[in-house]
Amino acid sequence: MFRSPSVAGALCGTIASAHDPSGRELSNFPHRGHRLLWNLEPDGDGHYENGEAQLPDMNRSLRANLELEGEDLNVKVCMVGGALCDRET
């Protein structure tokens, strides 16, 4: 679950909580409170582009796009000039 305050009109996302596959909250999740997404610019219809995503386990920041589809949040992160991308829901 993310908190997503707007910063200067751009969307940012901070990890507010994490859950295991059964839906139980993980109280000891090490990345809780960390900003994961920032500078996502609205592009209409639930699309946000040109942002950044922090991958804490890799200590890297990558280009990110976000799409809201109903209750699903799709995040696409890319590296190597967009040649290598991954998408998570």
Image (cartoon, helix red, strand yellow):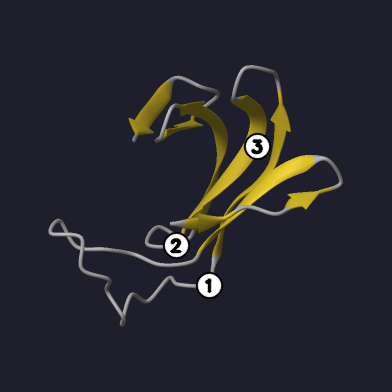
For the view shown, which residue lies furthest in the bottom direction?
28
Question: What is the number of the mark on residue 51?
Answer: 3
The amino acid sitting under disc 2 is Pro
List x then y, in percent, for residue 1.
Answer: 43, 57
Question: Mark 1: few, some, or many residues within 10 Å (few <14, many ≥20)?
Answer: some
- Image coordinates of residue 28 in percent, x first then y, are 31, 82
Q: Secondary structure at mark 1?
A: loop
In the rendered structure, the answer to whether residue 80 lies left or right of residue 86 reads right
- The residue tagged with tag 3: helix, strand or loop? strand
Residue identified by numbered label 2: 56
Where is residue 45? Give x, y as percent: 62, 17
The crowd level at tag 2 (other Cα within 10 Å; few <14, some 14-19, many 20+) is: few
Q: Nearer the viewer, residue 55 or 29?
A: 29
Question: Which amino acid type corresponds to the residue marked 1 in the rendered image?
Answer: Gly
Q: Nearer the viewer, residue 16 or 70?
A: 70
User: In the rendered structure, are the residues bearing label 3 and label 2 in contact, judged by CB atoms less than 8 Å apart?
Assistant: no
Secondary structure of the residue carrying tag 2 is: loop
Instruction: Identify the residue at image location x=69%, y=43%.
Output: 11
Distance (Cα) linking label 3 and label 2:
16 Å
Q: Residue 58: x and y, percent? A: 40, 57
| Image height of 5 relative to 16, above or below | above
Instruction: Indicate which label's residue lies in the foreground, 1 or 3.
Output: 1
Which residue carries the number 1 mark? 33
